[in-house]
Image (spheres, rainbow, N blue to C red):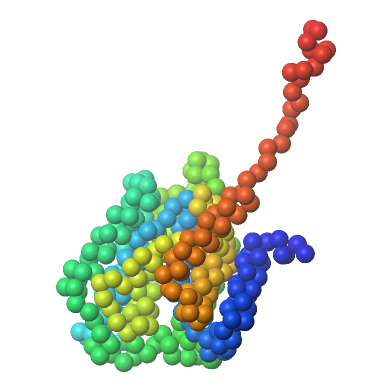
Amino acid sequence: MKILKQREAQLALSIAALALLVGWRAPVFLTAPSLANLLTDGTLLVMLALAQMLVIVTRGVDLSVASTLALCGMSAALLASRNPGLPLAFVMLAATALGLVLGLLNGWLVGYLELPPIVVTLGTMSVYRGLVFVLSGGAWVNSHQMPAQFIAFPLERLLGLTHLVWIAAATALAAWYVARHSRFGRDLYAIGNEPASARYVGIPIARRLLWTYGLSGAVAGLCGYLWVARYAVAYTEIAYGFEFTVIAACVIGGISIAGGCGSVTGAVLGALFLAVIGNALPVIKVSPFWQSALTGLVILVAVLINARGGRSKGRQILQLHLNNPARSAA
């Protein structure tokens, strides 16, 4: 069937096969509570992968996403613990706004100053992570210091699903609309495919990059609150190294690191694939230290598949007459 040849369909089948294989080894993995917990655990990775997808499509990368998450999460925890009377919506909005500002800084450096994205975000990654320590003084914010509603919101249920799942679904829907049905999204793909041509036709590349990194920061800021509230603790090493997991989810989902190619469905499936691996290892009693090795192996395979899929064979347009007897005689 033609649909089975599509990358997303193959990845979805791989996720199902992996889940069934783990379920055969440990039937508890396929129970409703276990699958619901798997879905909830994968929501933050899904949201961050969707934001990262838009960045990678432009031939960029945001290595500061986990540090932005940590700084916004710590800020939200401190704000709520010191001002317990503040409405939860205000705290969430403040975390998102802070992430937006941090992302816009990346976008300004990349878009308007035309600095390499990997260098810019590598630098801001260290700066933002250091600011987490400065802001908190190295101290933790524990669950008993946070308001009850602050902690409860992510795992509260609506129509049987947690708020985390609903927020991730809304993020996926918004990303799908931006990528497929907005001029902004079409411009991002054009920039990733051919920056010179995009500039020639009048696409405001600097402005698009500014807001692409801004969106990445805003999503990371919201995830900062959700992460802290979900685990009921804020500390200086929140989500340490998580940016590589986010990028891995994108690569596994078929988003080309060369830019110009990628889908929302692929980003979601890539994140869910890693979530299944992360949740399956403890169930089948495999050391969690193997998770990094397995993730790295999957990334290498995904890059190989992407490279082979993106390789186009050259087609001869004009015939060569090097050995043409008539031409030789002439």
Q: Residue at x 54, y 67 (%)?
A: 270
Rendered view: 139 above or below 124: below
Residue 134 location in percent, x, y?
Answer: 18, 68
Q: Is residue 107 left or right of residue 188?
A: left
Residue under the point 52% across and 80% down: 284
Residue 142: image quadrant is bottom left
The image position of residue 69, as x and y in percent, is 34, 70
Residue 117, percent across and down? 38, 51
Asked if residue 62 can be seen in this view, the reply is: yes
- Measured from the top left, where is residue 258 in percent x and y? 51, 49
Is 198 left or right of 17, judged from the image as shown?
left
Decide if residue 12 is in sight here. Answer: no
Quarter of the figure with residue 317: top right
- What residue sits 64% from the left and 61% below the top? 7
Quarter of the rendering occupied by the C terminus: top right
Task: Please give left or right for residue 214 compared with residue 57 in the image.
Answer: left
Furthest residue in direction left, as rendered:
137
Work out whether residue 310 or residue 76 is closer to the camera in this orientation and state it.
Answer: 310
Residue at 76% from the left image edge and 26% from the top image edge: 319
Decide: is 285 above or below 159: above
Q: Residue furthest top?
A: 330
How many dots with numbers? Answer: 0
Q: Is residue 270 above or below residue 145?
A: above
Above or below, comparing residue 257 to residue 325 in the picture: below
Quadrant location of the N terminus in the rendered image: bottom right
